[in-house]
Amino acid sequence: MTRYADLADDLTDAIRRGALRPGERLPSVRQACASRGVSASTVFQAYDLLEARGLIESRPRSGFFVRAPQSGVAAEPMATMPVGDTTEVAIADLVMQVLGSTRDRDVVPLGSAFPSPRLFPLADLARSGARSMRALDPDRLVEDLSAGNERLRHQIARRQTLAGIAVDPDEIVITHGAMEALDLCLRLLTRPGDIVAVESPTFYAALQALERHGLRAVEVATDPRDGVDPDALAAVLARHRVAACWLMPNFQNPLGSLMPVERKRAVVALLARHGVPLIEDDVYGELHFGATRPPPAKAFDEAGGVLHCTSFSKCLAPGYRVGWVSAGQHAPALRRLKTMTSLATAVPSQLAIAEYLVQGGFDRHLRQLRRRLEVQQQAMRAGIERHFPVGTRVSRPQGGYFLWLELPEGADALALHRQALACSISIAPGPLFSADHRLRRGLRLNFGHPPEDTRIAGALETLGQLAGRTGISAAR
Amino acid sequence: MTRYADLADDLTDAIRRGALRPGERLPSVRQACASRGVSASTVFQAYDLLEARGLIESRPRSGFFVRAPQSGVAAEPMATMPVGDTTEVAIADLVMQVLGSTRDRDVVPLGSAFPSPRLFPLADLARSGARSMRALDPDRLVEDLSAGNERLRHQIARRQTLAGIAVDPDEIVITHGAMEALDLCLRLLTRPGDIVAVESPTFYAALQALERHGLRAVEVATDPRDGVDPDALAAVLARHRVAACWLMPNFQNPLGSLMPVERKRAVVALLARHGVPLIEDDVYGELHFGATRPPPAKAFDEAGGVLHCTSFSKCLAPGYRVGWVSAGQHAPALRRLKTMTSLATAVPSQLAIAEYLVQGGFDRHLRQLRRRLEVQQQAMRAGIERHFPVGTRVSRPQGGYFLWLELPEGADALALHRQALACSISIAPGPLFSADHRLRRGLRLNFGHPPEDTRIAGALETLGQLAGRTGISAAR
């Protein structure tokens, strides 16, 4: 199951490091079989995957070759370099203004935060929900309040333990999606006026939460491939008294960056030395294209300072509003806060998911979903390479469903957003992701909508043309 | 359908006013038929209902007589007289400490805030949920975000219009229960440090919300029968700069008071004159024992200053976490706040309830539920009269599922709570319901658990004995 993926990952790495260069021929299937001790079909599967990733191409009767970037677009964006000051957050107006109109069916949802609901096993979930609600013990309606349904917590604990975080069901607090998880953690760990360290760029919903709680943000340099920079974080911690840190180590929104294990370990240790708790948002962790699920930072938490937040909204059950916090020592206080704030998470949603997990099929669904997202990423990257102006940089995330673009000098993503919306296309412009509204050339595009949505290819062409014009007019 | 209830209500009123006094004979069935122009069976039904209410008794071959109070317990509690200062709220610790252990199956849940889940049509809801999730259009999962499911909002608007508040579906914001509704309204209308006027006593969850938002409470004198006193409210408004008012005009928690229509009208007008918005919590409005649903204060709102909050949790679907705000002009701002805070309400819950409402059967369920609650109230009042010490006062609410007791001089409800819990009985002591922890002799008991729970009678006997001892020992 994982051999071909291992091989593909090794080759991907070699291509990215430059050990295999554009135009270079890959080992023949026979050579690869011999050197890796695997079957020919394993090699073919690996090469198929590399082709789907857009890294290699097959030439008839010649073999497989590393693909040359087709335009000046293929480079990845640069790591951000925020100035390191703390900022009062006031992002909500901009977010609502920009995203208010993106839920219209007639708008191509490239700016959406959600993947297509059609990628999820909604019929299976409906069946699980029906079965579990038929069998509901009414008294559980009261007993499951606040901490969440016991069966669901057991299922989650089992999965998390398999994924490398040993969690007791009693440490898990079920929440109304990951947004409530974040909200509760901030309430628990901060007071108004406190400073919270976040990635640059940061998911706007986290910025909105900081704004709501009267918190100040300090943004930390973040690499589109490897995530937050431990040295930059150390500098921020030395300079500011930080009350908490909020990070997405796995497939960060919007960058798609994945922190290597060593970075995760370094960041967790650094925060522990400073006594700063880490609120880890891991909602995209299951959407990895590589063979194995990347561990969350929580897996390296020896001091108990990491609150691991995630949800089923992005990987299984959008709209069900079921998330959770693995809160360790903070669990009793979080549970209490949850009871006071929203009493409980909706029982029908919890039971449907618990029953689905018990029945099995989640892993099969995840494998399909990851494969589809990887293929969709490739299609969107190809469209961007074809249509966007030279000098555009685009991320190459190994999971999730977002691409992060950096438009050429002089571009203005907010202007592009307005022009695109006039063409019934939504995008998520960079300033949404920064407390001080920088990142004017940044752009998040959602590739979570399947190619059956034929409007997407045309939308990329239109966007590319608009982006080209914007760059030129701004440069004049 | 309503004739017998009208007759019963008129007679109830006459008995409460003292126009018909204990021991007095009611009109014979024949007299009543003639004077009201109704059939004999209507009169019999009305007299049955009065008997269930514990107001009259039939004596063989003599007719029906107004029942004498069996002990010194029958008097209703006095109206509260808060001092009128504003108070910083710090109630959360006490609430959690007292209520933390009340969800255990082995504890008799007289302190619970929830009626028995067995009173609700859970099987019908499960069927509606299964049907609606099978038929789900996946795209609705995104389109229904924030404002809530369109079909559900239409059903709610229809019901509300029938109940006397003409509401457009677009003014309705679906929330994660009434608790989120209250939370969003407070966020919208207040800033930390602001003053909010509340009833005395007040539901502790509202006090917790004030605490969470850093708000100060000012408590207003409230009568156990007629609710908040408009003159006392006027005095508070004259003395303090109040940012918002939070009231439960229908079957207040914990008093059970029902504001007469004139009081509602007066309070709404008074608040409008002062430009103070009213957050109206109407979660018990459907649980009326009288013939018609009492109108919410919103029905008298000409200036658009009332935000009407309610939910399905107490009348149809506990654990589903579906509430809403009829927010009028505030709807767009509330919708936006909802999106930023919790994104959306769980879709399976919304669809199950929408489908249930479309199918019909809600009114039939409500009629049964009201009748059962009324009978259960009577049973609990009888137990209290039998077992509690002389001098105990107990409310006689016309809806909901709470009784409010005032124990004799010297009693200490917090001590009683500890003693009762040692006997596996929970109660909700008065200090939970006051920002300044007064109401030491107050006590809320839940009669929402059906007589099939045979532990209840014994629990009342135990409680009465404990209360008697407490009073005596405190008086010594």
Image (spheres, coloured by chain):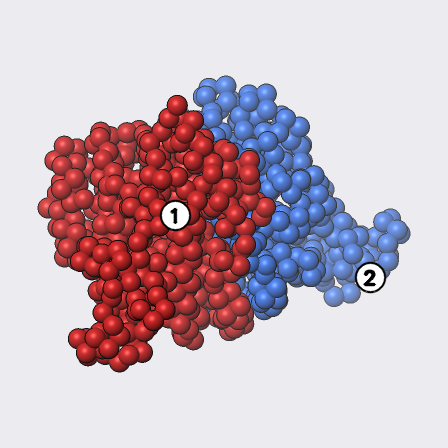
Chain colours: A red, B blue
Q: Nearer the viewer, mark 1 or mark 2?
A: 1
- In the picture, the disc for residue B422 is none
Residue A170 shows in the view: no
Query: Which residue is at the front of the view, A26 or B113?
Result: A26
Task: State the image coordinates of residue B337 (x, y, percent, origin top left).
Answer: 47, 38
Query: Which residue is at the front of the view, A237 or B200?
Result: A237
Task: State the image coordinates of residue A111 (x, y, percent, origin top left).
Answer: 45, 44
Q: Residues within 10 Å of mark 1 (few under 14, many from 20)?
A: many
Residue found at the very far top of the displayed protein: B238
Distance CA(mark 1)–CA(mark 2): 83 Å
Residue name at image x 48 percent, y 30 percent: B189
Query: Which residue is at the front of the view, A57 or B340?
Result: A57
Q: Is residue B267 above or below residue A383?
A: above
Total marks placed: 2
Task: State the image coordinates of residue A5 (x, y, percent, origin top left).
Answer: 28, 69
- Residue B351 appears left or right of B97: right
Q: Residues within 10 Å of mark 2 (few under 14, many from 20)?
A: few
Determine whether label 1 and label 2 are within 8 Å by CB: no
Residue name at image x 28 percent, y 39 percent: A200
Query: Which residue is at the front of the view, B468 or A166?
Result: A166
Say what secondary structure mark 2 lies in.
helix
Q: Is residue A465 above or below residue B26?
A: above
Task: State the image coordinates of residue A236 (x, y, percent, origin top left).
Answer: 17, 36
Say what secondary structure mark 1 lies in.
helix
Q: Quadrant of the N terminus of chain B?
A: bottom right
Q: Amino acid at mark 2?
A: Ser
Residue name at image x 36 percent, y 32 percent: A440
Asked where in the image residue B51 lies, by quadrant, the reply is bottom right
Which residue position holds label 2? Answer: B41
- In the picture, the disc for residue A385 is 1
- Residue A305 appears left or right of A399: left
